[in-house]
Image (cartoon, helix red, strand yellow):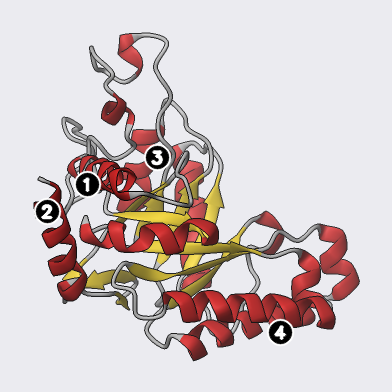
Amino acid sequence: MALALISQVAFELKTRPRVDCQNKLFSRNGQSFPFKAMRLEGIALQLDFNAKLALLRRFEKLKAAHTTGLVLSWNQADAIIELAACAGLPALVEFDLAPKDVVDSGAMTAALENAERLVRLLQGRPGLFGYVVNCQFSPETVRARGLRRLRRGLAAFFDTIHGGDSGALAAVRRRADMMAISIPGEDFIYADAAALKPVELCGYLAALRDIAGQRPVVLEFTEPSPEQDEAVATAFANGAAGVVAPRLPAPESVEWLDVRALRPEGAMPFRRFDTNCPSAPYGSSKP
């Protein structure tokens, strides 16, 4: 069993295509690729042989539950990304920046060097989808430093990413404090979303699509909710190319998830969605 998994890893790593942007969507090997992703928790950064086998089995369960990708921290990426590729789960790698890393020349130089090392380390890895730059600005920072300086700083990180790996996609993680900032070199739009009613979510996505133009939009639901299935369906039905969602918590009653038994994989956020047609969950009569 272990040798079979290792052989599968070697084969998949040679044949796994990268993800590209095409007509406001993602594509892989010429086919539309709906990005339905989760973040990973509780993963050791140093994995022995048995831990790698266990992680491969975990990834297979994620894939069976219609998850198609991952979001990894930059600390996780080196140890995990090739295993994720074996399971067919391309990964976005997120690296965190402090506001000073974008607006102060000394701090920016060090942060750009770190980003360059990360890109060089991951360049050409089959499981790499792209990068998400996570930098949260306070309104005070925006007022004090100015939007132009923030844009220039973030654009420098995109230049570093594309310079080190021309095939990697890159975006900034957007929040309300920088939703409408246009940043040169951004390949897709990645934005956080709180729990919103369907009509509010539709309006939010419309605003993101206006910002994106011809680029794909990825939406991350930062908190689980009982209405998460409907929110995921609404996001895809209204033009999202990808959704990142958390694992659903254990229900207080069986009616909450409309299931009788909640196995560990039963709480996965995309378990009720078809892999190729994610706009409506199984059993739903809604468009």
- Left or right, residue 134 beside residue 50: right
Circle 3 — which element?
A: helix
- Gap in angstroms between the C-alphas marked 3 and 1: 20 Å
Dot 3 or dot 4, earlier in sequence: 4
Contact (CB < 8 A) between labels 3 and 4? no
- Gap in angstroms between the C-alphas marked 1 and 2: 21 Å
Dot 1 or dot 2, earlier in sequence: 2
Q: Which residue is mark 1?
A: 63
Contact (CB < 8 A) between labels 4 and 1? no
Contact (CB < 8 A) between labels 4 and 2? no
Q: Amino acid at mark 1?
A: Lys
| Residue displayed at 30% across by 45% down | 55
- Left or right, residue 208 beside residue 283: right
Q: Which residue is mark 3?
A: 231
Q: Amino acid at mark 3?
A: Ala
Q: Which residue is mark 2?
A: 3
Q: Amino acid at mark 2?
A: Leu
Residue 71, horizontal then vertical, whole percent: 43, 55
Circle 2 — which element?
A: helix
Dot 3 or dot 1, earlier in sequence: 1
| Residue displayed at 65% across by 85% down | 156
Q: Quadrant of the N terminus?
A: top left
